[in-house]
Amino acid sequence: MAGTLSVGAGVHANETVGTDTAGVAGLQFHDQSKLDVGPNSSVRLDRFIYDPNRSTGQVILDATKGSFRFTTGNQNRGPVRIKTPYGTLGIRG
């Protein structure tokens, strides 16, 4: 079911965030990780696990179309997996 995200709305596993040509989305997760989705894009959150007591977790994103930026938060070097059909990935830091 498609809908519009609003401030404070939850995003769940296997949910796709899609934008049209004029749309953008900015998501912030419990560990302060951030996912910015650009115009005309589609990104599915396959898995996001975070254990604040151990500062560990796992992130799996499926970026099927468009542009996005993912910035890690407090997960102490937890694995991040980004699946794309093709594309360019830059890692900084």
Image (tube, grey):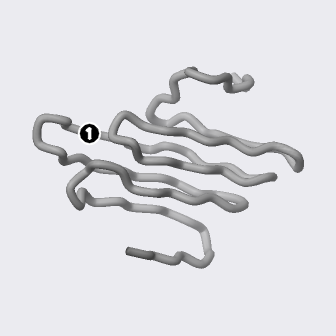
Q: On the rendered image, what quadrant is the C terminus found in? A: bottom left
Q: Is residue 81 above or below residue 39?
A: below
Residue 89 picture location, percent across and down: 53, 76
Residue 79 picture location, percent across and down: 27, 60
Residue farthest right in this picture: 21
Residue 85 position by quadrant: bottom right
| Residue type for callout 1 | Tyr
The residue drawn where x is 68% and y is 49% is 42
The residue drawn where x is 68% and y is 41% is 25
In the displayed structure image, the side of residue 55 where residue 35 appears, left or right: right
Q: Is residue 61 above or below residue 1?
A: below
Helix, strand or loop at label 1? It is strand
Q: Nearer the viewer, residue 71 or 88?
A: 71
The residue drawn where x is 49% and y is 37% is 14
Q: On the rendered image, what quadrant is the N terminus found in? A: top right
Q: Which residue position holds label 1?
A: 50
Q: Nearer the viewer, residue 19 or 31?
A: 31
